[in-house]
Amino acid sequence: MYAPQILIEAALNGLMTGAVYALIALGLTLVYGVLHIINFAHGALLTVAMFAVWGAFALVHVDPYVAMIAIVPLMFGLGYGLQRFVIGPASHGNDNNVLLVTLGLSIVLENGLLALFTSDTRALDSDAALQVIELGPLLLSTPRVIGFVAALAVTGLLWLLLNRTDTGRAIRAVAREKLGARLVGIEVDHVYAVTFGLGCACLAVAACLLMPTYYVNPRSGAAFVLVAFTIVVLGGMGSIAGALVGGLIIGVVESFSGLLLGDSLGQIGIFLIFILVLLVRPAGLFGARA
Amino acid sequence: MLSVVSLTKRFQGLVAVDHASLAVPAGSITGLIGPNGAGKTTLFGMISGFLTPSEGRVLFEGQDVTAEAPHLRARRGIARTFQIVQPFAGLTVAENIAVGAYLRHPKRADAVAKAREVGTRVGLGDQLDKPASDLTVAGRKRLEVARALATEPRLLLLDEVLAGLNPSEIRDILPVVRSIRDGGVTILMIEHIMQAVMTLCEEVFVLAQGRMIASGPPRQVCADLQVIEAYLGKGAAARMKAEEAVDA
Amino acid sequence: MNARDLLPLILVLSVLAALPFLGLSGSVLNFLVTTLIIALAGLGWNVLGGFGGQYSFGHAAFFGTGAYATAILQMKLGWNAWGALGAGIGLGALVGLAIGYLSFRAGLRGSYFALVTLAFAEVFRILANAADFTGGAAGLLLPLRPGLATLQFADRKLFYLLVLAFVGVALLISRWLERSRFGAHLIAVRENEEAARALGVDALAVKLRAIALSAAITGAAGGLYVQSFLYLDAGVAYGTWISVEALLAPIVGGIGTAFGPLVGALALQGLGEITKHLAGGVPGVDLVVFGACLIAVIAFAPRGLLGLRRRPRKARAVPVGA
């Protein structure tokens, strides 16, 4: 029915998209793993980062990959501040409240962007998107290959950060035993905010990798957030390896279901996986049951 | 009334309860004692239906209820309290008790009347309209008992209702337990405070490391060497015997 | 329930019923109709989320099902509007039951339940956008035929009163929840499921009944919505906007109280109109205010607007763990 070349291209495209998905999911799963909350504003924060990339390019002509140097720390700061001064204090330590506060935050961010930039879709006005790499008979889009490699590299860096640095040790201590961590002098609220900041920094990187081939409007992030939730649930809440593998799987599934069902129905595959995993195996493929 | 036949519960290889059997005669207050981690609460969980046994059977009034859901057992007449008290935080004391009373009284007026009566009986009479979250620990223990009692059970399972209370609070609650039994409710209680067990229970079962190691009237069981060993470690019984000999 | 329980309800409904006869302009009346429809959707959400403590992020699934059924049964099968609306309510309840059965059987609660309901609503949206009998992406246009059988009235007041009647029934149901065995069981399950089960409460059955009731009420809101606007597409019927509105109204007004959703809907929609007016056509500003309200209410007024009025006699309204 399909030529093998089309299928292979679909698989590779899926893997490349999946790596960026994984990066987005990584931020979500990290926050879940440490704070044990679902950050519903994750998608809207991604949109903010994507607009930042677009703004840097459109206003001051900074290449997205260069803009990363500024946008990553900015998003980290935004995430740190939001958790420390808004989400944390407003939620009174109740999980349902966190869900609602982050929902409120996503509504504010998404519609704030709508008010500022209207619902117009914007893309980078650059020909970088059209460059390709030839791999035998296959043509691969250069920015997507870069995205794939960079996403994997950032995942590796994050792993190193968590496992080889003092900050990482503090984060893991808080994730495992909040009270115990407090007792040995770790400032839990600070660690929470740092973790949330790291989650947002992941989004900043993802935004810089996405923008050369993608577009942004105030609802762009919303399209990614359910995908990211699916990945996180599939990979096991809080699991970094799970997010990576889950992201790659979802990327491929989306690519194939788009090929088989067309664009409008293509997304449904992801939601069905999401629902099925939640109903059948809520702990995900990798996670241990909480 | 209740018989537990060779119940076993394994959690991923760990045996929490190991072929334990016990029988609770109708109209009695029966005690279940044992060191921490012996599996008492696990055994309660299986009797009340929150845990499914790996092996063995639970018989209530001759009927096999081993696989029945907790709410169905409550309808049969088995009620339980929880070691960690679990009041419905958003409700008043009377409303908390009414949730139990609704089991036999579908009409609100009847259930509320029943709840107030039971609440008064366990000594919460002047606190019925307070939010349950305002109660002291002793008050919450009473609430826990009242809620279970409001389901009008024939068998009441009490899980450490005296734990965390001071001596005068314990002294106040003992007559409540006895009056519940005198009202026709059979009681099986997990308890750590030996003095209470001695005064209340007619029959005591001892669980240690998941096994039922002794049973009988409290005085006799207390004197049983194995029990002392289970509580105080190997050799303790012999040491105590030696000390007694010295004292004598 | 006795007369004293019903008095506030009768008072509020009387005032609302008198409103359209005070010479309000057509646009104010339209605003009130929309607000009441949102209040109705919120009253539905409140049954499951407020009284039952199960926060759904996907009440659009029920709203949209009610709306599509009401429209499609009339347009494709020639049903009269009353029958179609009734079927829409029933189908909404059925969808609720199905989603509830799958989710609650799997033991989903808290964030997981919120996410799975959101995903279900999205699946419905994508399907409705792609299917033929829903009109696909073009949507459905209900022909304008004023009459009692088509539930379309030349006089907007009559439609307003019809919506108000539904709100009245939903308020009555909420009031009943505060005063009945089923309501007590539902609140007990919200506060502590394990303790409730020990007291003979069949937690699964209670949650299923709650989600069916909740979905039926929100389904009715969907049916009335399409009768009001005579137009429907997947984004309107199954969009996240209505899932959000349905939870915002009760949370802002007072979660787990009978009047909370009504108060919340009136306050939010009123605030939204004012904001839109002040912002002069800039899109999204009203929603920014809604989002900020949600955060502010959770941070500073967990019992909602009704909770500000007085310290409640009974701490009934407090959500789990607050």
Image (cartoon, coloured by chain):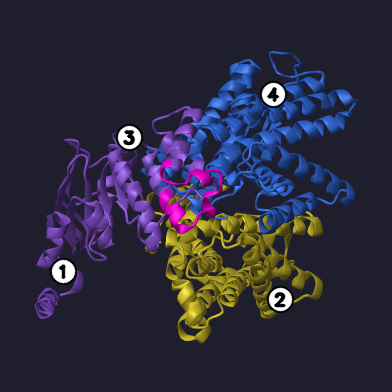
Query: Could you give the CA–CA distance between mark 1 and mark 3, rounded to whole angstroms?
Result: 38 Å
- On screen, residue C140 versus residue B232, left or right, reads right
Residue C141 visible in rendering: no
Q: Residues within 10 Å of mark 1 (few under 14, many from 20)?
A: some
Given the image, on which type of amino acid does mark 2 rest?
A: Asp
| Residue at 33% in and 34% down | B75
Give the residue at mark 4: C165
Choose mark 4 or mark 3, whichever is in front: 3
Image coords of residue C9 (percent x, y)? 69, 29
Residues under labels 4 and 3: Cα distance?
Answer: 39 Å
Color used for chain C? blue
Q: Which chain is in yellow here? A: A
Q: CA distance from mark 1 to mark 4?
A: 72 Å
| Amino acid type at mark 3 | Arg
Label ID, residue B193 = none
Estimate the spatial distance between the alpha carbons at disc 2 and disc 1, rounded to whole Å. Answer: 78 Å
Secondary-structure class at tag 3 = helix
Residue position marked by numbered label 3 in the rendering: B75
Circle 1 SS class: helix
Q: Chain of mark 4?
A: C
> Of the residues shown, which amino acid type is indicated by label 4?
Ala
Identify the residue under disc 1.
Answer: B228
Q: Secondary structure at mark 2?
A: loop
